[in-house]
Image (spheres, rainbow, N blue to C red):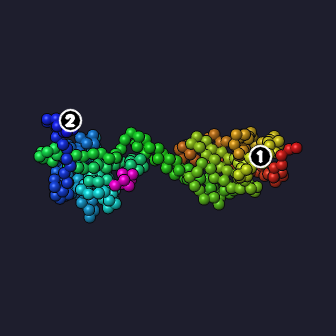
Amino acid sequence: MNELTAAPGIGKLERVALREVWRHEAYDFTRWLQDNIDVLNEALGLSLVNVEREQAAGSFSIDLVAERESGGKVIIENQLEKSNHDHLGKVLTYMVAMEAQTAIWIVAEPRPEHVSVVAWLNESSSSDFYLVKVEAVRIGVSPPAPLLTLIVGPSAETAAVSRSKREFAERHDVRQNWWSRLVARPDAKLHSHITPGPSTWIGVTSGVRGLPLNYVITQQDCGAELYIDRGKGSEAENKSIFDQLFARREEIEQAFGGPLSWERLDDGRASRIRARVTAGGYRAPEDEWDAIQTQQVDTMNRLHKALQPHLKSLKLGYEAPE
C-alpha cells in the first residue's frame, strides 16, 4: 500500500460537481461570492469592497459590481460552465457600460481560445482582465470548499506590452496626422496626390524608376531625400547611380543652397541623398508643426529642383568596369 495514503491524518482531495454545491449560478454562487468576497481577494491578491449584486447595464444585469480599495469599479461575471463567446461579450459590454477598469470572469472550464483573448486584452488595453477557474473540493466527508485558480491576469510584463502597443498605435496616429497636414499644403504640390499613411516616410517618383523623392520624419527631426533602390539584385546599379550624382556634388549642393548628407550605405542595397531639417519632428507641439513643415516642404522643393537636371542625364543599367 502507498505509504502516503496509509499515513494517519492525510486525506484524499476530491473534486465535487459545482452544481452539487451551487445549484443555481445567480441565486446560489453569486450570492455566496458576494458574502465571501475575501476568497476571491485572496486568490487574486486584490482588495475588493462594496460588492453589489445584479447591477443594471442597459437591458442586462451584471452579476457583481465591486470597487477596489485604491479606487475604480470592478465587474464580476460568473459562469458555472465552459467559457463561451456570449459571456465574453457580456464582460466587455458591462465594462463599457459601468466605465470599469477591471473585469473578473469566473468560469468552470476556461477554453484555450478565451485564455488567449484575455491575455491579449491585458496586452492591448489599459484595463485589467482576470480569467478565474472555479472548482469545489473536499477531503473525505468534509463540507465542500471553493477552489479559485487564476488562469490569466494582468502582470508587470503585460502592462509593459500594453504600454508599448498603445505608444506604437499613438505614433501611427500622430504620423498620419502629420502627413495629412503636409500634403494638404499648397506649397507641397509634388506630393499632393499622396494618400497619407502611418509610416515614417511618404514618397513620389522622381521620374526615374526606383529613385523616389521621399519626405521622412522621426520624433526629433524630419527632412527630404532621394532614395536610390532599383529593386532586387540592383545593388551595383544603385551604387553606380549614387556615384554619378556624387561626382556632381558641388553643383547639386550649390543649386540646393546648402550641404546634403550623401549616404552610399555600402553595407546595404540602397543609397540615399538626404537633406535634414532639425527644427523638430512629429513629437514637437502641434502649434509648431506649420513652421516645421514650411521648412520641410521648402527643403523638398529645393532638393527636387537641384536634382532634376542630373537625374535626366543618368546612365542607367550597370555594366561592371573591365
What is the x, y in percent for residue 138? Answer: 17, 46
The answer to whether the residues at label 1 and label 2 have Cβ atoms under 8 Å apart is no
Which secondary structure lies at badge 1?
Answer: helix
Q: Give the residue furthest to the right.
A: 322
Camera-side residue of 309 and 156: 156
Report the side of 305 relative to 158 (left or right). Answer: right
Image vertical order of residue 246 relative to residue 62, above or below = above
Mark 2: amino acid: Glu
Q: How many marks?
A: 2
Q: Is residue 124 visible from the viewing direction of this image?
A: yes
Horizontally, residue 112 falls left or right of residue 278, namely left
Which mark is drawn over residue 247?
Answer: none
Label 1, label 2: how many angstroms apart (C-alpha)?
77 Å
Residue shown at 27%/40% (left/top)?
45
Q: Which residue is mark 1?
A: 236
Q: Residue 89 vs residue 61: left or right?
A: right
Q: State whether residue 254 appears in this view.
A: no
Q: Residue at x 23, y 53 (%)?
A: 64
For marks 1 and 2, give the one nearer the viewer: 2
**Quarter of image, res 251:** top right
Q: Position of residue 59 (x, y in %)?
A: 26, 64
Labelled disc at residue 3: 2
Identify which residue is drawn at 81% across, 52% down. 317
> Where does the magenta region start and end?
111-117
Q: Residues within 10 Å of mark 1 (few under 14, many from 20)?
A: some
Residue 58 placement: quadrant: bottom left
- Marked residue nearer the N-terminal end (1 or 2): 2
Q: Amino acid at mark 1?
A: Ala
Which quadrant is the C terminus positioned in?
A: top right
SS class, disc 2 = helix
The front one of 259 and 321 is 321
